[in-house]
Image (cartoon, rainbow, N blue to C red):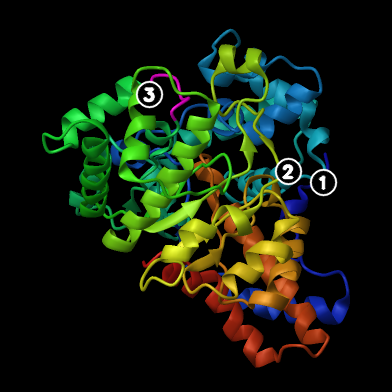
Amino acid sequence: MPTSIASDPDRLLPAETRTRSIARELLERVDNLPIISPHGHVDPSLLAEDTPFPDPATLLVSPDHYVTRLIHASGVPLDQLRVGGTTEVEPRQVWRRFCEAWPLFDGTASAYWLRSALTHVFGLTEELSASNADATFDTINARLAEPGFRPRNLFKDFNIEVLATTDDPMDELSAHAKLAEDGSFSGKVIPTFRPDSYVKIETPGWAGRVQRLISAAGDGKTGYEGYIRALENRRRHFIEHGAVSTDHGARSPFTCKLTTAEATRIFERALAGDADAADRDVFEGHMMYQMARMSTEDGLVMTIHPGIYRNHHPDTFERFGGDSGHDIPVPVSFTEGLRPLLADFGTAEGFHLVLFTVDETVYSRELAPLAGFYPSVYIGAPWWFLDAPDAMLRFRASVTETAGFSRSSGFIDDTRAFCSIPARHDASRRIEAAFLSRLVAEGRVSDERAHELIVDIVDAAPRRVFKL
């Protein structure tokens, strides 16, 4: 059985000998720095309760839409992978399906993360295959039963210093409070305010959700006024529990500034179920503007993740729900869309706006120039379909010549897969070392400066941008 290539100490580093040598030294400079994870989707109760992980399939396959979507594309129904909580097949059978499909992942970022986790977390030394599916399932299952593989122990072993979660505005954040009060847990787990389902009026259940929000946090006010007050109050609740940022999965970067009367009219139509598509777009754009206004007042960093057509396949969404692998990128334009927001807040002292994209065409054309002028704007790390080695290298090449290194966010892992966190950060550090090593070899950056830059990129940038 072939040995896993995740054991190669030079993985992802340049092939050319001299440049690789430079990259090795740069990587060594940051290899042992703590992980700062300011944006991700790990369930905080995982750490608060510290319950053992389930079986390998439930941990590594079924919830990971990077994995299940590609297996599904080969003809395997999603229910055979236990997507969306389906239980028609046993976890061992899901793992067999995954191992049979393992060759499909050659060349993908998923293969890198999974190999790294399997090798460096679970100690597997062989490549997965159909023939060793049961043996690898049993090996991982046995490891998961060991006390050292409980979530809190792994949090410490992974050298995570800060882990941000993503949370509903009405969440009482009891898991975060429990962790903060537990003297035996030395890590820092912080919530992130994610108001999408309260802002996007087409979201199923929007009206009822908003009414509950107003009743709970509107200070007795009603209608649009109570809605705005409730959002402001819930943001303060998050700040009291350690939050440093808000997250917005916007349809597009479009923003606009409505009068209170205009916003009230659309809001009332939406509550009555009479809002149309134009109302939907204008209201979401207005609320993006309002969220920026709130950030200038309460200090929360604002992150925008636009440009995804959510739930592209209706039947899959109906059967398996969201995050089941069929969210597809679409083109976006930041320059015009953000102009109303940046006109009023782009130079506001203390405001941080982090812009993410899955549309590579805007890196050099829009994001780097915007971040190269507005003090508030930072370029978010390659995200989702772009958090892959070659795409991360293209990102650095696209934005650095215009905006330098200081205007980027630092790496974000954006993952629900807790055990993949160290692998994702390791990949990013290797890519940054590879990029900087080329600049050193070409005489564009001094070796001494490159050593300073990689520490800033890996450690200081996320602290600076996310106010940690």
Q: Is residue 362 left or right of residue 336?
A: right
Secondary structure type for disc 1: loop
Name the residue that disc number 2 marks: 111
Q: Is residue 203 magenta?
A: yes
Instruction: Give the secondary structure at mark 3.
Output: helix
Most distant residue in the top direction:
88
Q: Are marks 1 and 2 in contact (CB under 8 Å)?
A: yes
Q: Nearer the viewer, residue 468 or 153?
A: 468
Q: Which residue is mark 3?
A: 269
User: For mark 1, what is the residue?
Assistant: 107
Few, some or many residues within 10 Å of mark 3 (<14, 14–19, 20+): some
Magenta-drawn segment: 201-206
Which of pointers 1 and 3 lies earlier in the amino acid sequence?
A: 1
Which residue is found at the position 52% from the left and 42% from the top? 250
Expressed as whole percent of the image width and height from the top left, the position of residue 15 reads 86, 69
Circle 2 SS class: helix
